[in-house]
Image (cartoon, rainbow, N blue to C red):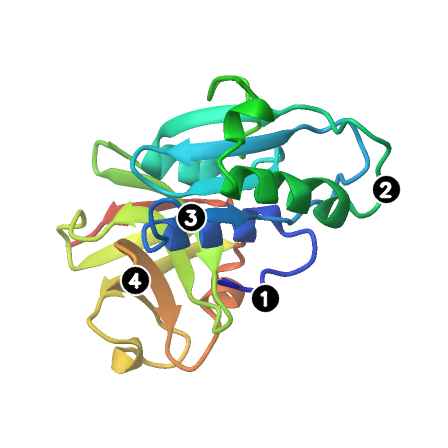
Amino acid sequence: MDVTHDVGRQNVRRAAYTVGVSGKYLGEDTVHLVVVDPTVGTDRRIVVFKPRDHCVFVAPDNGVLTLAYEWFRGEVYYAKPPSKPVSHTFHARDVFAPLVAEIVEGRLREHVEPTSLDAVVKLNYPAYERLGDRVHGCVLYTDVFGDVITNIPNGSLEATSYRLITRGGEFVVSQASSYSAGLAQQPLLIEGSEGYYEVAVNKDSAASVLGVTEGDEVILVGTH
């Protein structure tokens, strides 16, 4: 199954979100190769992640599995170095694909060595937390429409209106049930399909209006 080729060149954060939200739909005993690899040809490791009772991910150790580690938990391994010379520019063909084939054939343990979640590379995402009247979170993903998907869980916001603070400024946002509920340039808070709040702007890009991208911190302060 080919999940996507629309992540964007070298966009490890966007790939991390795609892997995370796709992971819960992937079948048990399946193996999935993730190749968004700006550091191909360097000494970066190859990581194999096996969530409990789930599929297997094979990826460069560059943080692309960060959200999968957080959301699924499980066993993590480093792949052993290749036994023969390989291209420095095409690891997907020369290293990853043969490793995936070996894992599919049931030879995972022959090609990996155990490591820990503390050892692997992880991207930095500001945590979701409540501090007094403030809710802190971050941008997990901005989609093709410019909608801003946060890490703030659906149902966790009690007020109807908030002051939204981003690196692009401060905005007034209100909870709504659809993308078309707001006026032009008015940001809305909507419960998203993946279980997290989104910020959207009717017929416009919320990411552009708010001045945010993946990994940025967002702060919500309830007004009423």
Q: Residues within 10 Å of mark 4 (few under 14, many from 20)?
A: many
State the CA–CA distance, disc 4 to disc 1.
30 Å
Q: Are marks 4 and 2 in contact (CB under 8 Å)?
A: no
Residue toward you, 224 or 23: 23
**What amino acid is at disc 2?**
Ser
Residue toward you, 86 or 162: 86
Seen at 47% across and 26% down, the residue is 76
State the CA–CA distance, disc 4 to disc 2.
50 Å
Residue toward you, 136 or 171: 136
Residue at label 4? 173
Seen at 57% across and 28% down, the residue is 121
Q: Are marks 4 and 3 in contact (CB under 8 Å)?
A: no
Q: Is residue 60 left or right of residue 82?
A: left
Query: Residue 11 at what x, y percent from top left?
Result: 63, 52
Badge 1 marks a residue whose secondary structure is loop
Q: Is residue 127 visible?
A: no
Give the mark, 1 or 3, whose residue is nearer the N terminus.
Answer: 1
State the CA–CA distance, disc 2 to disc 3.
27 Å
Image quadrant where one finds the C terminus: bottom left
**What amino acid is at disc 4?**
Val
Check the image and report above or below for 213 versus 114. Answer: below
Q: Are marks 2 and 3 in contact (CB under 8 Å)?
A: no
Q: Is residue 86 left or right of residue 57?
A: right
Residue at label 3? 30
Give the mark, 4 or 1, whose residue is nearer the N terminus.
Answer: 1
Residue at label 2? 87
**What amino acid is at disc 1?**
Asp
Residue at label 1? 6
Query: Residue 24 at what x, y percent from top left?
Result: 32, 50
Give the mark, 4 or 2, whose residue is nearer the N terminus.
Answer: 2
Q: Which mark is residue 55?
A: none
Give the mark, 4 or 3, whose residue is nearer the N terminus.
Answer: 3
